[in-house]
Amino acid sequence: MHMFAPDEQRKSRFSDRNAAIKPLRPFWAHAIRTVVRIIARSMLLAFVETRRGRKDYQALKGSLGAWFAEVRKASWPSMAAVKQHYANASVVSAERIVFNVCGNHYRLVVAVDFEKAIVWVKWIGTHADYDKIDVRKVEYEP
């Protein structure tokens, strides 16, 4: 095609190319890698230390470490994305999720702000202790 082609030819050439490419975000936004901020990691570490000396201590420590690393790198736009990655997670409300940890022996309750990429640890405990709490209202107590 000649550089000085009529407007109709130039217009159709560019519109055909752009018709297949419809970015959902600005082109530079795809290069940005966000890291999820996890608030109250100290709570997880303190809980693990309370389990020291038990036979599942190493398994719990490894499971929570793996969960922390995965969530920190996650890019969840919604609850559906969380459920897709963690099929056994229970969605309690629009912002609360319960994760099964260490073969469902422990439960981890978190609140998630998808827009800001923040996860707040609200509670962690044994499955038996989980049955005694109100998962919708439980809050982190330092």
Image: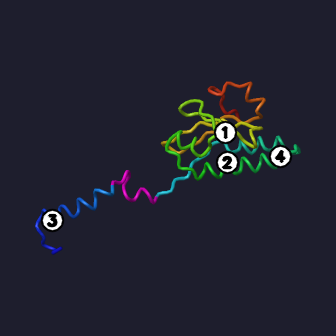
Judging depth in this view, the residue of 103 and 39 nearest the camera is 103
Q: Amino acid at mark 3?
A: Gln
Instruction: Determine contact: label 2, label 1, CB under 8 Å.
Output: yes
If you read the primary sequence from the N terminus, does the residue marked by circle 2 or circle 1 appear first? 2
Q: Which residue is mark 2?
A: 67
The mark lying in front, picked from 1 and 3, is 3
Crowding at label 3, few (<14), some or many (≥20) Cα neighbours within 10 Å?
A: few
- Which amino acid is tagged 4? Tyr
Picture coordinates of residue 50 (x, y %)? 82, 40
What kind of element bears circle 2?
helix
Residue at 83% over, 41% down: 51
Does residue 30 show up magenta in the picture? yes
**Pointer 3 residue:** 9
- Pointer 4: what residue? 57
Residue under pointer 1: 99
Q: Sequence order check: which comes first, mark 1 or mark 3?
A: 3
Query: Which amino acid, by three-letter code, is at mark 1?
Result: Phe
